[in-house]
Amino acid sequence: MANFRHRLAKSQRRAYDRSNEIASLRLRATPRLARAVSLLPVALAGDYPTETERRRKVNKVAQVICDEVCQVMQVSPLRVTVKGVRPIRDDAEYHGLYVSEGRSHEITVWMYTAKRRQVVAPRTLLRTLVHELVHHLDYTKLELEESFHTDGFFKRESSLVRQVESAARRVAGAAPGRTGDALALKSPRANDAC
Ligand SMILES: [Zn+2]
């Protein structure tokens, strides 16, 4: 990391250092956000007539998670697309992608593993979504010039995952058995693939 930072231009180094300094983001999780997070495993594991239907349902839940996070954090909304099998490029298996161009902000996540083509674990998908959201928040909330994978970045990611998961657990604990009802079931500035 130190070598990487060393190669950066001065203005990039400022963004890098600021990114590294911020270890958490406080998120006041709304009940809708908590419900959507608790529904993600349900949507992934459900019985559907087709896999397209599964993907549509997961996409709907993922979109609510992103809508709520963006609203609570008071940043521009973004569009989520859930796709099928993770692509492999340069020997790396893509989990998610964030692209921001002008006013258009988009997250893509894939819901089947590349080799075995299994549905990804709910926690993995949630973390991928949050990872891409952290890129979005880097630009829109922290107003960083670039969004680097610093130690601080991963700490922010973990802090958001912890907060939404604990909100989801509270909702599940408060209303057991009711988790299924709420959702019934230039060049790109950033192009992140993880
Ligand atoms: Zn990333």
Image (cartoon, rainbow, N blue to C red):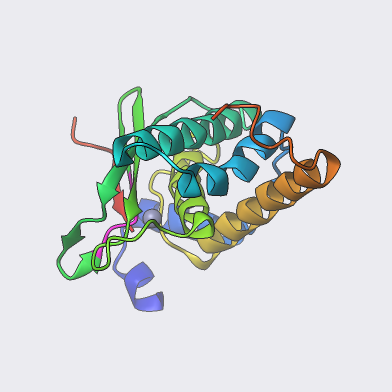
Q: Quadrant of residue 57?
A: top left
Residue at position x 67%, y 36% from top?
Answer: 35
The x, y position of residue 72, in whole percent, is: 65, 30
117 horizontally vs 89: left or right = right
Among the 4 quarters of the image, the one containing residue 74: top right
Report the label total.
0
Q: Is residue 172 left or right of residue 21?
A: right
Q: Residue furthest right?
A: 174
What main secondary structure does the magenta stretch of the protein show? strand
Q: Nearer the viewer, residue 111 or 162?
A: 111
Which residue sits at x=23%, y=68%?
Answer: 115
Residue 18 within the magenta-colored segment of the rendering? no
- Residue 96: in magenta span: yes
Task: Give the quarter the ligand 1 occupies.
Answer: bottom left
- Please give the range of residues in magenta: 93-97
Image x and y of residue 48, in percent: 40, 38
Q: Does residue 183 sit above or below 146 in this rendering?
A: above
Question: Which residue is pictured at 41% across the width and 50% down the height?
Answer: 147
Q: Which residue does the image show at 19% across and 30% down from the upper left?
A: 186
Using the image as rendered, state which of residue 4 and residue 86 is in the foreground.
Answer: 86
Image quadrant where one finds the C terminus: bottom left
Residue 126 at what x, y percent from top left? 52, 51
Comparing 20 with 136, the one in front is 136
